[in-house]
Amino acid sequence: MYENRIRRTELEQLIITAEEAAMLFKDKMVVASSGFTKAGDSKAVLMALAERASKEKDPLKVTLMTGASLGQGTDGALAEADALSLRLPFQVDPIMRKAINKGEVFFIDQHLGETANLLRANNFPKIDIAILEACLIEEDGSIIPTTSVGNSASFAALAEKVIIELNLSVPLSIKGVHDIFSTGEYPTRRAIPITKANSVVGTPNIAINPDKIVGIVITQKTDSPAEIEAPDAATTAIANHLIGFFNREVAKGNLTKSLLPLQAGIGKVANAVLTGFTHSDFEDLTMYSEVLQDSTFDLLDSGKLLFASGSSITVSQEYYDRIFGDFDKYKDRVMLRPQDISNAAEVIRRLGIIAINTALECDIYGNVNSTHVSGTHMMNGIGGSGDFARNSYLSIFVTTSVAKGDKISCIVPMVSHVDHSEHDVDIIVTERGLADLRGLAPRQRAQVIIDKCVHPEYKEEMQSYFDRACAERGGQTPHILEEAFSWHTSLRETGSMKKTVMV
């Protein structure tokens, strides 16, 4: 069953169960796992570790680092088992989120393009054990990853020991899709020679010293499916505003109908925006992103998208079955890279990426909060949005103008937490309209955002705040500090930001 998947035959003696692998972990270890946005993650060993920790009388708490989020409910199981002391750099699990916000698990919210560099610069403790999912072990002990690369190549290089989860459910036809490249160590790091989205600069396999391998666990579980919500009226309107903007840029001669390589964050808004391209006049598009989602493959199927580079394939169950049922159809049109390459500032700047990411809230000057509810409670994390926003040709943030039945305005006087400063934000889009902030001073930006992006329920109050701030306080970026967070205060005290209940 697995014989053709372990081509270094002496490694077959290292086959163990997930439960046996879990016994290799000790309290206070630093553990790394493959996995990027629920794709290519540990599906057996970490769950077995959670089960062991839930039964242990003595403490068994580890630091866990990954590429991005895990699937299978793994983060939640580890949190419930009290098996984690520190988690980084990203998560999406509601149980884990609750533990983080209660202070039970420390969380480092980190730019996804930085984790590998910080590890290589010895800014974290040494990795004791790395768990890496693979579909094939080559004769030299190297592995062919599955549906993501993430930080796996760095984990393989830096970990003291490696456990391989050999996933038989992933077809061997995926071999050749990965492009593994390392810039090397400081101070002699190499340039990344990617000059277009489909540049091949590395190898299809992740090198591993066979002497590091302490166990091979056989699995057959597929990735947790992405939860894709169909575009609704609001997200479709956002997509249409963006398509209109790009058409105007083409008319001005700033872009061609092929635009520039696209990057889009995850979620229903970003997915709807990409879906909007399917019905547009744009053609010969390319993508240089992190996550290849359902809409990516719709664009490939439509012929609008020629090539997509990312770090993971994260799709719904329907799309997973379709894609991997005939992967040869896509194999020459997609590529998966390490996340320090997919998110590298050098490459993002060189290619001129058009970055489209999602905001929780924006303020009238263009600052963006992507991570914290009311400034305190973590949702998921910044992910790679900062890597792209700071370095892109166009930095676009999308959000609906309101949330929770209009009780929350997603455009506020001052964001309660800043992930992306006004200096890194070019365009803000809601279903109400698109604010092009390029070339505008702060007071000009504020008026455009109020005019174009604020929901009518909140526009009068927002205009009043801005006018009074200009008249009473002045300054480069006028604010009335004692009122700046009054909308958030009203939400906490009354359950709504609406003017009719605001104090």
Image (cartoon, grey):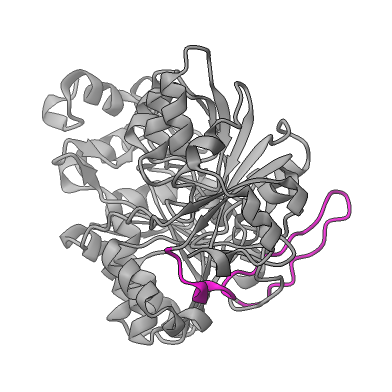
Most extreme residue toward the left, as rendered?
500
Query: Magenta-highlighted stretch: main secondary structure?
Result: loop
Percent across and percent down for residue 307 are 50, 79
Task: State the quadrant of the C terminus.
Answer: top left
Q: Is residue 380 above or below residue 106?
A: below
- Magenta residues span 169-196
Q: Residue at x 61, y 24 (%)?
A: 26
Q: Is residue 231 above or below residue 408?
A: below
Q: Is residue 102 left or right of residue 490?
A: right
Q: Decide whether residue 423 is among the magenta residues.
A: no
229 vs 442, nearest the viewer: 229
Q: How many marks?
A: 0
Q: Is residue 187 above or below residue 363?
A: below
Quarter of the image where one finds residue 177: bottom right
Q: Residue at x 43, y 37 (%)?
A: 47
Q: Decide whether residue 195 is among the magenta residues.
A: yes
390 vs 266, nearest the viewer: 266
Most extreme residue toward the top, as rendered?
57
Percent across and percent down for residue 33 are 56, 44
Percent across and percent down for residue 340 are 65, 55
Quarter of the image where one finds residue 497: top left
Can see residue 305? yes
Q: Is residue 340 above or below residue 417?
A: below
Can see residue 414? no
Q: Residue at x 50, y 43 (%)?
A: 17
Most extreme residue toward the right, as rendered?
188
Q: Is residue 344 left or right of residue 121?
A: left
375 vs 439, nearest the viewer: 375
499 vs 281, nearest the viewer: 281
Percent across and percent down for residue 287 are 50, 72
